[in-house]
């Protein structure tokens, strides 16, 4: 009887840490999605209200690179979250 109790006590912290990881990844995904929406709005705003400043005119291109990086990070974290949740459910 004592052996299953030890195994059970080891599983609970592991399960709890996995839940924390998935929760943290969800929060990161939320922040990334919010940042992508802000970048979209900024790009549209700049394109709709151009100014003669060269730096301002090239900003949408720079923001597009930033947005691509955000999308890539979002995709990787989302995929990792899916894999992590599948391994948790497949016990």
Image: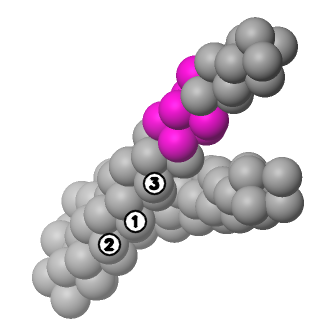
The residue mark sitting in front, 3 or 1, is: 3
Q: Can residue 57 be seen in this view?
A: no
What is the magenta segment's predominant secondary structure? helix
The answer to whether 63 appears left or right of 40 in the picture is right
Q: Name the residue under label 2.
A: 37
| 73 to 12, vertically: above or below | below
Front in this rendered view, residue 42 or 58: 42
Front in this rendered view, residue 61 or 21: 21
* Residue 89 picture quarter: bottom right
User: Regarding mark 1 in the picture, which secondary structure is present there?
Assistant: helix
Range covered by the magenta-colored residues: 13-21
- Contact (CB < 8 A) between labels 3 and 2? no
Mark-to-mark CA distance, 3 and 2: 17 Å
User: Regarding mark 3 in the picture, which secondary structure is present there?
Assistant: helix
Q: Which residue is drawn at 69% across and 58% down?
A: 85
Mark-to-mark CA distance, 3 and 1: 10 Å
Mark-to-mark CA distance, 1 and 2: 6 Å
Query: Could you tell me residue 16's position as x and y percent?
Result: 53, 32
Looking at the rendering, in which quadrant would you find the N terminus? top right
Q: Nearer the N terminus, badge 3 or badge 2?
A: 3
Q: Name the residue under label 3.
A: 26
The residue mark sitting in front, 1 or 2, is: 1
Q: Mark 1 points at which residue?
A: 33
| 38 to 10, vertically: above or below | below
Is residue 65 one of those drawn in magenta?
no
Query: Could you tell me residue 75's position as x and y percent?
Result: 67, 63
Front in this rendered view, residue 48 or 35: 35
Characterize the local packing of mark 2: few (<14), some (14-19) or many (20 or more) Cα atoms within 10 angstroms: few
User: Regarding mark 2 in the picture, which secondary structure is present there?
Assistant: helix
Query: Could you tell me residue 26's position as x and y percent?
Result: 45, 54
Characterize the local packing of mark 3: few (<14), some (14-19) or many (20 or more) Cα atoms within 10 angstroms: some
Query: Could you tell me residue 30's position as x and y percent?
Result: 37, 59
């Amino acid at each position: 009887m004592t052996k299953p109790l030890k195994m059970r006590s080891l599983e609970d912290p592991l399960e709890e840490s996995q839940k924390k990881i998935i929760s943290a990844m969800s929060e990161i995904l939320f922040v990334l999605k919010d940042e992508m929406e802000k970048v979209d709005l900024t790009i549209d705003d700049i394109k709709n209200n151009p100014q003669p400043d060269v730096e301002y005119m090239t900003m949408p291109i720079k923001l597009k690179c930033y947005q691509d990086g955000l999308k890539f990070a979002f995709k990787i974290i989302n995929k990792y979250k899916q894999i992590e949740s599948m391994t948790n459910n497949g016990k």
